[in-house]
Amino acid sequence: GQNIDQPTEMTATEGAIVQINCTYQTSGFNGLFWYQQHAGEAPTFLSYNVLDGLEEKGRFSSFLSRSKGYSYLLLKELQMKDSASYLCAVTGNTGKLIFGQGTTLQVKP
Amino acid sequence: GAGVSQSPSNKVTEKGKDVELRCDPISGHTALYWYRQSLGQGLEFLIYFQGNSAPDKSGLPSDRFSAERTGGSVSTLTIQRTQQEDSAVYLCASSLVGVQSTDTQYFGPGTRLTVL
C-alpha cells in the first residue's frame, strides 16, 4: 500500500525555525514534493527532492532520506504569512502524486 | 493565460442534479490532473490526462464521475446525480510533460462544490 504521514498541526513563533516531518511508504519512489496551501487557495509548489540530502531555497529547505522513507521541510525566520498548510507528496511507481493529509502551521507573534 | 484557471469558482447545487466543472491548463502543458479536497483533508487523486493517451481514471470514486479533455487542452469534470458527500473543492493541475518525468504540477484556484 501507499502511506504518507505528517503531523496534523504545528504552532511556532514568529522569527523562529520550524521543521515539518513527512514519512512515506510507497510502491517505488520517483520524487518527493512539498507544497504550501493558504486557506481557501490552491497549493503552490515549494520544493522537489529526488536525491538524498538537503535542498535550500531561501528561508525554506527540504531534506530527503530515501533509505529511511523520510523528509522534512525546514522553515527559518518564520513570518506570519507562513501560516498555512504544508503538503508532502510522493510519486511512486505509477508516477502519480500521492499527497499526505497536510500539516497546518500556525505562526504566532 | 499565465496559470491554470477553473470555473466556476463556487457552485451550489441540489442533490441529484448534474454539475460540470471546467479547467483551462497552462498553455503548452500536456498533462492535466483532477483532485478533490474535502474539508481539512489532503488531496485525493481523481483522474489524469497525458497527451493523446487514454486517461488514468483509477481515482474516480464512482461511475457518477467522468471527465474529458478536448483538443488536448480544456478539461471538463462531470458529476452526475450529485450527492452531499460530493461536496468538496475540486482542484485541477497541469504539468509540462507528465507523471513519468515527475515534473512540477501547477494548480488552479479550485471549484468549491456544495451539494445541498
Image: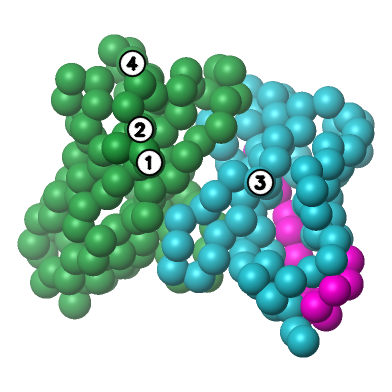
Give neighbour class at mark 4: few <14, some 14-19, many 20+ (Cα, 10 Å): some
Give neighbour class at mark 1: few <14, some 14-19, many 20+ (Cα, 10 Å): some
Residue under pointer 3: A46
Residue under pointer 2: B26
The magenta region covers A1-18
- In this rendering, the answer to whether B17 lies above or below B28 is below
**Residue A18 visible, this orientation:** no
Q: Amino acid at mark 2?
A: Ile
Which mark is in front, 4 or 2?
Answer: 2
Distance, label 4 to label 1, CA atoms, is 19 Å
Q: Residue at x 69, y 24 (%)?
A: A30
Residue under pointer 4: B51
Give neighbour class at mark 2: few <14, some 14-19, many 20+ (Cα, 10 Å): many
What SS does tag 3 mark? strand
**Chain A image colour:** cyan
Callouts 4 and 2 on one subunit: yes
Residue under pointer 1: B3
Chain at tag 4? B
Q: Amino acid at mark 4?
A: Gly
Location of residue B18 in the rendering, given as x and y in whole percent from the top left corner: 10, 55
Callouts 3 and 2 on one subunit: no
- In this rendering, the answer to whether B3 lies above or below B87 is above
The first of marks 4 and 1 along the sequence is: 1
**Chain B image colour:** green
The verdict on residue B108 being magenta is: no
